[in-house]
Amino acid sequence: MADYTNDYVLQSKIIGTRATIKGLADYHISDAIALVDREAGVHQLSGHYASIVPLAVFFSHKYPSYLANIKNRTSLRNGMGETSGLGYQEARNSEIWSPIKDAMADFKAIYGTDIITKNSNGDPKTVNDILNYLSEKYSGNLKTGGGGDTVFKRTLKILGHIFY
């Protein structure tokens, strides 16, 4: 078990990602707006936002090569649920998400007990703690997808377009 809460590079990436999401929302980027809305409590997903953004950043920190595929197969101007100019709905494109689903099993096995953030009370949160918000498809504990998977994918998409 490693504690990354004092890793200045990772924590700076998390802070920078949150600021970038807010900045993109100001530019009317729909995926960023959806994430900002969740942070504000829309659909009661503020906890998802608070935890999953650091998870997505940590995943991209450890597995940066997956972000090039996301960047090449998505458009920042299109929302994940829209049919893009590329002819498919980004949120459901298996060429984008299947490799990440597969990688998440290894990610969980290697980093599951690592602490990457803290909750609002200051208690440490591990990768495994945060995976409770994701579906089994992404090595989480929920039977079906939902808000957690969406927050994860939208954050990875933004990371792919902005930082990689």
Image (tube, helix red, strand yellow):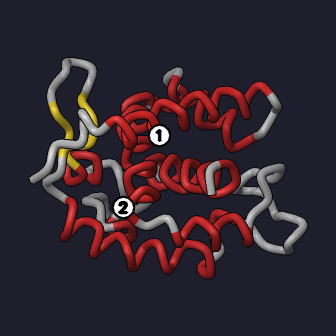
x 47%, y 53%: residue: 146
Task: Choose between 39 and 126: the one closer to the eye.
Answer: 126
Three-letter amino acid code at the position of disc 1:
Lys
Q: Are marks 2 and 1 in contact (CB under 8 Å)?
A: no
Q: CA distance from mark 2 to mark 1?
A: 25 Å
Q: Position of residue 2 (x, y in %)?
A: 14, 50
Q: Position of residue 57 (x, y in %)?
A: 44, 48
| In the image, residue 89 above or below residue 20 | below
Q: Mark 2 falls on what kind of element?
A: loop
| In the image, residue 149 above or below residue 94 | above
x 59%, y 51%: residue: 159
Q: Position of residue 9 (x, y in %)?
A: 39, 41
Disc 2 vs disc 1: which is toward the camera? Answer: 1
Q: Which mark is residue 85?
A: none
Find disc 1 in the rendering and name its residue: 13
Circle 2 packing at 10 Å, graded few (<14), some (14-19), many (20+), is some
Task: Choose between 68 and 153: the one closer to the eye.
Answer: 68
Q: Residue furthest right?
A: 85
Q: Mark 1 falls on what kind of element?
A: helix
Q: Position of residue 111 (x, y in %)?
A: 21, 61
- Judge from the rendering whether residue 68 lies leftward or rightward of residue 127; answer left or right: right
Find disc 2 in the rendering and name its residue: 135
- First-in-chain label (2 vs 1): 1
Three-letter amino acid code at the position of disc 2:
Ser
Q: Residue furthest left?
A: 1
The image shows a total of numbered marks equal to 2
